[in-house]
Image: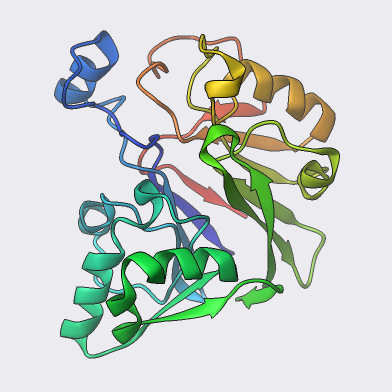
Amino acid sequence: MTKLMFRGTGDAMGVPRVYCGCPVCEEARSTQVNKRYRSSLQIVDEIAGNVWIDCGPDWARQMEEAGARQVDAILITHAHFDHIGGLVEWADACRWLGKRGVAYSPSEVISEILARFPWLATHIEFRSFDEPITIGNWLARAWRVNHGKNGYSYAFRFDHKESDVAWAYCSDSIGLSEQEQEPLLGLDLLIFGTSFYEEPYAYDTRSVYDVTEALALIQKWKPRTTYFTHMSHDIDLRHPYPLPHNASFAYTGLVVEV
């Protein structure tokens, strides 16, 4: 059995936002129901070990809360800071532990990362994720998705080699074409990014679907279970949103078995 552990469920700024006094941010500072680190997922697999998706600027705190000291590999969706800001700390950890980290990402993402931080290659081996790779008993593949005004990201689909179980992680997307949607059809589990419940801003200024749009999409895609991640301070986990029985908001520390 593979366990998926949500270590971060927030958008690029996280929750609470340092400048904000809204009810969600204030609650996040006190009782912390809505406290959200930048989005990441820990995959704990008896074969692959401790594998993470993305390594944002909260990575070290996420590792501390997870009680983890080492990572076997990290899959990187795209080169935005909220998804790669922790690579500096991971590289330093690799240096002190005397081991070389392994990161998988599509070639164009690797090029962007190393253009900004070329010295990371001293301590992290970046491997191309242009073709499917094996993570334990899962065959993982990456495909490029539209990220709106923020350009592009990648989503990952995992198909079990010995069963028909499949799940996907798509944290940063909007306006997906039919081709980009195809790998998201008929999943057992979908982890999907939704920054707002109903985003009020002009569509051409946006970069991530909102919850109302996602709910319409999952009626089409028909995943058995959906968890929403990459949430801004617009979403209040204390509020009884009208979600279907098979869709929920993720939260820090949530564990799902696949």
Question: Looking at the picture, how far across and down is residue 257, in whole percent?
Answer: 57, 53
Residue 140 visible, this orientation: yes
Q: Residue at x 54, y 31 (%)?
A: 207
The answer to whether residue 230 is left or right of residue 93 is: right
Q: Residue furthest bottom?
A: 98
Q: Is 2 drawn above or below residue 40 in the view shown?
A: below
**Is 228 in front, or is 117?**
117
Question: Looking at the picture, how far across and down is residue 176, in whole percent?
Answer: 73, 36
Q: Is 30 drawn above or below residue 44 in the view shown?
A: above
Count all numbered tags in the image, as a single digit: 0
Q: Residue at x 39, y 69 (%)?
A: 115
The answer to whether residue 8 is left or right of residue 53 is: left
Q: Residue at x 38, y 16 (%)?
A: 236
Question: Looking at the picture, how far across and down is residue 148, in whole percent?
Answer: 59, 34
Residue 210 visible, this orientation: no
Question: Looking at the picture, how far across and down is residue 215, in whole percent?
Answer: 69, 21
- Indicate the quadrant where residue 16 lies: top left
Chosen colour scheme:
rainbow
- Quarter the C terminus occupies: bottom right
- Indicate the quadrant where residue 203 lies: top right
- Quarter the N terminus occupies: bottom right
Q: Residue furthest front?
A: 115
The answer to whether residue 85 is left or right of residue 93 is: right
Q: Residue at x 51, y 12 (%)?
A: 201
